[in-house]
Amino acid sequence: MSRVLAGPFAAQVLADLGAEVIKIEQPGKGDVTRRWGPPFHSDDAGRETGTAAYYYCANRGKKSVTVNLAVSAGQEIIRKLAVASDVLLENFRTDKLAEYGLDYSTLQQHNPQLVYCSITGFGHTGPYRERPGYDLLIQAMAGVMSVTGSADGPPLRAGISIADLSAGLFAVIAIQGALLERERSGLGQHIDLSLFDAQTAMLANQAAHYLVGGEVPGRLGSQHPNIVPYQAFATSEGYIILAIASDEQFARFAAVAGAAELARDERFATNAARVRNRAATVSAVGDLLKQRPGAEWIELLSAASIPAGPINNIAEVFDNPQVKARDMCLELSDPVTGPVQLPGSPLHYSRSDSSAATTPPPAMGADTDSVLSDLLGLDKERLTALRDKGVI
């Protein structure tokens, strides 16, 4: 019972882990991301299908069931599905589902073993509990934009929806933890997860700079606040990333670059010295890297076990041989629209694997009849009556 990205992404990861995932959608409307285009998915003939590419990113491995939550018959269907389920995942506004009798305190009376995960912008407690929360707003309020961008430029949004995605991953962790605890207690519980909390937790070392070190971090472009040199550099042809994390790596870099004396210079000999002399370090390294093309540097540095690489665009990512070797681009067969390519799952197990990745994102309501028949025992006549009344 979640929409947009955080909840659907969490449910997709759970599907990759082997869960049977039923996506509840509003009849006739569905998840709003189905319409968040262009771009839209095209069929084999090149015709737009009307389903946005965005929807495809977080909904593979699921079944779609349409239920009208605003009517009592629809609410009763959800209550019965909750009895037959292990987990309910939702991202409605705080207290909204209580209006429908679908909040945790109500559903746990029907199924005490139910794990009920709520994802909201700011959580179910605190002064902001009733505020709406979207990824951009959370990135701003949780400090991410204050440390993203150039030092002399405006605050920037991260290039991906990091607040939504991190909240989704925390939801997966929390749900698995609650299921494990249920094995001991026999009881489910409510998980109150907010995008704001998740993004604040993700501040990690940047938060420690302030909480432990007393310094308020600022924007550094691609640079790292604690490690130098660790950023993008211009070469004679294009940009590369150089990510030196130890003094040994810096010494090897200096040798490969034909400037071994840099590693003996007291300004650059240790990481602490390089951080204190950031501008001088970046200037010295930058001058060296401008002497060769980026591709040549990457080959030389990689051979010396020095982390370096290209700055790929999205097309280059999916053309990368490592991405192909790891099956991180899937081609799935959609029975309605034909083949569709999607990012794969990064979860690779030695003994077990998931088949969920081979199931494309469902058409809206594609599984309504089969799910309600199999789980709730509704026959064809009952399903027809519910559909005629706008319940499903």
Image (tube, helix red, strand yellow):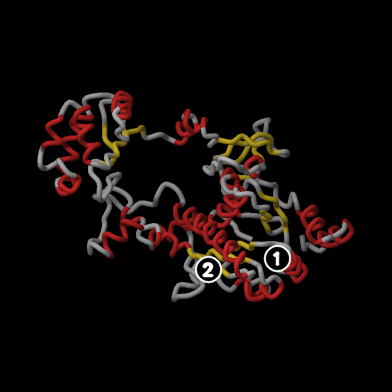
Q: Which residue of the protein is positioned furthest toward the right in this rendering?
A: 381
- Tell me the element at label 1: helix
Locate residue 264: give its quadrant: top left
Q: Is residue 35 visible?
A: no
Residue 226 in the image: x percent, y percent?
25, 50
Residue at the spot of label 1: 82
Above or below for 229 versus 91: above
Residue lying at 49% horizontally and 55% vertically, measured from the top left:
164
Residue lying at 45% horizontally and 48% vertically, measured from the top left:
160
Neighbor class of circle 2 (other Cα within 10 Å; few <14, some 14-19, many 20+) is: some
Which disc, if any, is residue 274? none
Neighbor class of circle 1 (other Cα within 10 Å; few <14, some 14-19, many 20+) is: many
20 or 366, nearer to the observer:
20
Residue at the spot of label 2: 192
Residue 323 in the image: x percent, y percent?
49, 33
Residue lying at 66% horizontally and 62% vertically, measured from the top left:
86
Q: Which residue of the protein is positioned furthest toward the left in this rendering?
A: 266
> Which comes before the other along the chain, label 1 or label 2?
1
- Tell me the element at label 2: strand
150 left or right, relative to 262: right
